[in-house]
């Protein structure tokens, strides 16, 4: 029953991880990442054999492993949600264009109050700087994807640079295509 409960918690946390604009959830995730991957920085770890309470140490080690696994799964879910930003430029552009069309259609039909053409260029730069690239760094740090993590980070940075150079013209083109 406890495994069923843990699985449910993991599933709920994974789904909630896709809500990247909730400041409270973002702060909690950052805190859990820090605890999972940086909590022992600067501390002198004693040899496990020197510990008087091996049972306690084993429980702590299991808790640490579970904490890392949970936060890594959440970040994998987040990465899958924005995977196009960490792939080849043409893949990024294709999915960016699709999202823009979807958001534009929602605006035109009254389902959204904001016109995506207003701020799309700068919004993508912000998204790369504040979400995609930091996420790619975390994926690299935890090592879950091996050498592919470096590739994801490299593509994210390259796509951000390419967007900075070409994004304004791309937005202009997308707007023109949708208004004809």
Image (cartoon, rainbow, N blue to C red):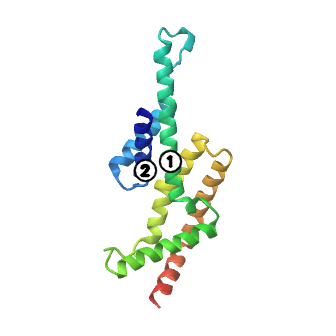
Is residue 7 or residue 161 the one in the foreground?
A: 7
Residue 107 placement, left or right of 55: left
Residue shown at the point (52%, 74%) measured from the top left: 97
Location of mark 2 (residue)? 17
The residue drawn where x is 47% and y is 77% is 101
Could you tell me which secondary element the residue under label 1 belongs to?
helix
The answer to whether 97 is drawn above or below residue 23 in the figure is below
Residue lying at the far front of the rendered structure: 1
Q: Nearer the viewer, residue 104 or 154?
A: 104
Side of 109 relative to 43 (left or right): left
Q: Which mark is residue 114?
A: none
Cα gap from disc 2 to disc 1, whole angstroms:
7 Å
Q: Is residue 177 shown to the viewer in this render? A: yes
Horizontal side of 4 relative to 142 (left or right) equals: left
Say if 64 sits above or below 32 in the image. Answer: above
Residue 165 point in image, percent of width and height: 57, 70
User: Which residue is the site of mark 1?
Assistant: 75
Q: Residue at x 44, y 46 (%)?
A: 11
């Amino acid at each position: 029953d406890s495994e069923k409960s843990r699985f449910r918690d993991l599933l709920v946390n994974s789904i909630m991880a896709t809500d990247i604009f909730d400041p409270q959830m973002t702060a909690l995730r950052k805190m859990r990442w820090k605890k999972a991957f940086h909590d022992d920085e600067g501390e002198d770890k004693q040899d496990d054999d020197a510990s008087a309470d091996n049972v306690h140490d084993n429980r702590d080690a299991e808790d640490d492993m579970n904490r890392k696994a949970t936060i890594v799964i959440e970040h994998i879910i987040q990465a899958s949600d924005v995977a196009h930003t960490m792939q080849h430029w043409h893949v990024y552009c294709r999915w960016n264009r699709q999202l823009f069309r979807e958001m534009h259609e929602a605006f035109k039909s009254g389902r959204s109050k904001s016109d995506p053409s207003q701020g799309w260029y700068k919004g993508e730069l912000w998204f790369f700087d504040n979400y995609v690239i930091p996420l790619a760094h975390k994926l690299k740090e935890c090592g879950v994807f091996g050498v592919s993590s470096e590739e994801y980070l490299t593509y994210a940075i390259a796509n951000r640079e390419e967007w900075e150079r070409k994004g304004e013209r791309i937005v202009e083109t997308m707007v023109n295509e949708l208004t004809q």
